[in-house]
Structure formats: structure tokens, C-alpha cells
């Protein structure tokens, strides 16, 4: 799989910090193959790591450094925002899920690794939602 083919949702990457070894190993395996994230994913990771996981800042920064080293980061722009509005209206996703989808579409990704959307769903014929933990 090429680096630009897969986009990672926050929910998948947060397993890197979990105590669920099978999911943590799967997330790590996928991340090592490379992919794309957005600044939104980085922001959500910081929020979850500091609030839910209560990680100290040095551990948060170390995790972010690893994720950024293995992915290309898509900026949050007005174009992403506008595309997210279209996605939210058409597919009835939450706006924040739509921002993730929009960034994946703009990045020309063909796979969106995500637990929060329907596994196997096609979005605009070019993006397929994949729950990497589905059996």
C-alpha cells in the first residue's frame, strides 16, 4: 500500500496508547506502513491522551512525534471545511467525522481506517471506510 492510500482516524491511532495488545499491535502495524492524517487528528489525540489517558506531556509529544514521522499531515483549511460541509449534508455524518472524511478525500486517499463509520461504506466512489479491528 502506498503512503498516500490510507487515512487514519483518531480512534484507530489512540489504540497505540491502549492496554488492548491486539488492537495496539494492529494500529502499530498499519501505521508503520504509512499514511495520512490531518491536524484535527493530532489535536484530538492530544485531547484524548491528556484527558482520558492522563499521559504526561513528554509522553504525548513522543507519541505525536512518532505519528508525524510515519504519516503525511493534511492541514485544516477552508477547503477542508467546505468539503466537510458537503460531506455532512450528503451523508448525514457528524461535522467532526465529516472533517476527517473531507481531509481524506482531499488527500486522495482510497482507505479511511476508522471505527466510527460503517465498515465497507464507500464515500464519493473513491474512499472506502475500513474498521481495521472488524473480524
Image: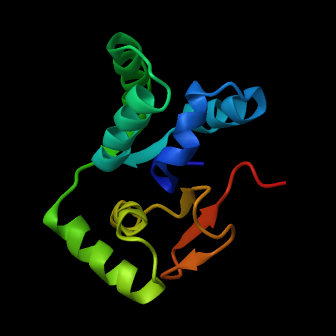
Quarter containing the C terminus:
bottom right
x and y percentages locating residue 2 in the rendered image: 53, 48
Asked if 109 appears above or below 88 in the picture, the reply is above
Q: Quadrant of residue 99?
A: bottom left
x and y percentages locating residue 71 in the rendered image: 42, 37
Whether residue 69 is visible, yes or no, is no
Name the outermost residue toward the right. 135
Name the outermost residue toward the left. 78
x and y percentages locating residue 84 in the rendered image: 31, 73
Q: Nearer the viewer, residue 99 or 31?
A: 99
Left or right of residue 107: residue 128 = right
What residue is shown at x 32% (from left), y 83% (from top)?
A: 86
What residue is shown at x 22% (from left), y 75% (from top)?
A: 82
Q: Nearer the viewer, residue 72 or 46?
A: 46
Q: Nearer the viewer, residue 94 or 22?
A: 94
What residue is shown at x 68% (from left), y 24% (from top)?
A: 19
What residue is shown at x 35% (from left), y 32% (from top)?
A: 46
Asked if 64 appears above or below 110 in the picture, the reply is above
Amino acid at each position: 500500500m502506498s503512503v498516500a492510500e490510507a487515512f487514519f482516524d483518531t480512534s484507530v491511532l489512540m489504540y497505540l496508547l491502549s492496554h488492548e495488545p491486539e488492537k495496539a499491535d494492529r494500529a502499530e502495524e498499519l501505521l508503520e506502513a504509512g499514511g495520512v492524517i490531518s491536524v484535527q487528528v493530532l489535536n484530538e489525540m492530544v485531547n484524548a491522551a491528556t484527558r482520558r489517558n492522563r499521559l504526561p506531556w513528554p509522553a504525548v509529544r513522543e507519541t505525536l512525534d512518532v505519528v508525524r514521522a510515519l504519516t503525511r499531515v493534511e492541514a485544516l483549511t477552508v477547503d477542508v471545511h467546505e468539503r466537510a460541509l458537503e460531506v455532512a449534508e450528503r451523508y448525514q455524518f457528524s461535522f467532526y467525522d465529516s472533517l476527517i472524511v473531507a481531509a481524506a478525500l482531499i488527500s486522495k486517499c482510497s482507505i479511511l481506517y476508522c471505527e466510527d463509520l460503517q465498515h465497507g461504506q464507500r464515500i464519493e466512489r473513491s474512499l472506502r471506510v475500513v474498521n481495521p479491528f472488524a473480524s
